Image (cartoon, rainbow, N blue to C red):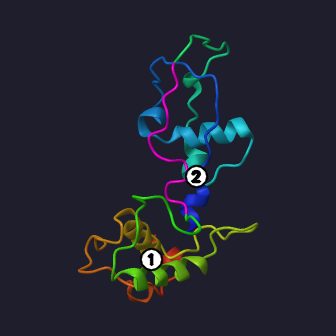
């Protein structure tokens, strides 16, 4: 399922960075990364938090560090979490027996959301529903959302009829 939050993530960009201690408040708060990348790419901030965040200026130098290093293989497959056509490899997470109908309902709900395309409508997805489908996928459709007694269908979520702006 493709949804809004996944579309907001930035890709990885290879840059000359220093291994020195990064002391900016942005680094400590964890908010400067997207802002730094946005400024490097010359794009507008994605939201108010990015606009207000301090770029991580002291993470970069004008001269590259050409010290040799050994690259480590990625520990998480690059296509983890993406829907794959047909049968997946052995050990791939699958929807447990008995939850297929609910998972299908959530997939249909997700397909109707304005989360992609050429003109996505940011923050128009109901956060109560978005949080639940993210939770269900992350927990393999085995655990109810915190505070719920069971896994709910999209039309059973409390606050499902409220506009997204009223729920944040």
Direction from residue 51 to residue 73 in the image, left or right: left
Q: Nearer the viewer, residue 92 or 21?
A: 92
Label 1 with label 2: CB-CB less than 8 Å: no
How crowded pointer 1 is (Cα within 10 Å; few <14, some 14-19, many 20+) is rated as many
Mark seen at residue 98: none
Left or right side of 44 for 151: left
Q: Which mark is residue 9?
A: 2
Q: Which range of residues does the magenta coloring cover?
A: 70-82
Q: Gap in Å between the C-alphas at discs 1 and 2?
A: 20 Å
**Which residue lies at the image location 47% right of the left edge and 80% below the top edge?**
106
Is residue 159 in view?
no
Q: Secondary structure at mark 1?
A: helix
Name the image quarter holding residue 151.
Answer: bottom left
Disc ID at residue 129:
1
Residue 89 placed where, x, y %?
Answer: 48, 58
**Above-or-below relation of 63 to 59:** above
Find out whether residue 80 is within the magenta segment: yes
Which residue is nearer to you in this view: 24 or 20? 20
Task: Tell me the quarter of the image containing the N terminus.
Answer: bottom right
Q: Nearer the viewer, residue 93 or 22?
A: 93
- Estimate how packed mark 2 is, as few (under 14), some (14 to 19) or many (20 or more) residues with alpha carbons within 10 Å: few
Query: Is residue 76 part of the magenta span, yes or no?
Result: yes
In the rendered image of this protein, does residue 17 appear above or below residue 153?
A: above
Q: Judging from the image, what secondary structure is the residue with disc 2 in?
A: loop
Residue 123 in the image, given as x and y percentages of width and height: 58, 69
């Amino acid at each position: 399922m493709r949804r809004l939050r996944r579309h907001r993530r930035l890709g990885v960009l290879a840059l000359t960075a220093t291994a020195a201690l990064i002391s900016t408040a942005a680094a400590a708060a964890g908010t400067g990364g997207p802002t730094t990348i946005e400024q490097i790419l010359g794009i507008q901030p994605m939201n108010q938090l990015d606009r207000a965040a301090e770029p991580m200026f002291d993470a970069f130098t004008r001269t590259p560090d050409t010290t040799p290093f050994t690259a480590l293989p990625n520990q998480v497959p690059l296509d983890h979490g993406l829907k794959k056509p047909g049968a997946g490899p052995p050990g791939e997470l699958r929807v447990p027996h008995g939850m297929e109908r609910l998972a299908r309902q959530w997939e249909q709900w997700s397909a109707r959301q304005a989360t992609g395309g050429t003109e996505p409508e940011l923050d128009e997805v109901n956060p109560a529903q978005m949080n639940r489908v993210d939770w269900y996928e992350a927990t393999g459709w085995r655990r109810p959302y915190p505070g719920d007694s069971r896994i709910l269908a999209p039309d059973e979520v409390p606050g499902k009829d409220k506009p997204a702006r009223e729920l944040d």
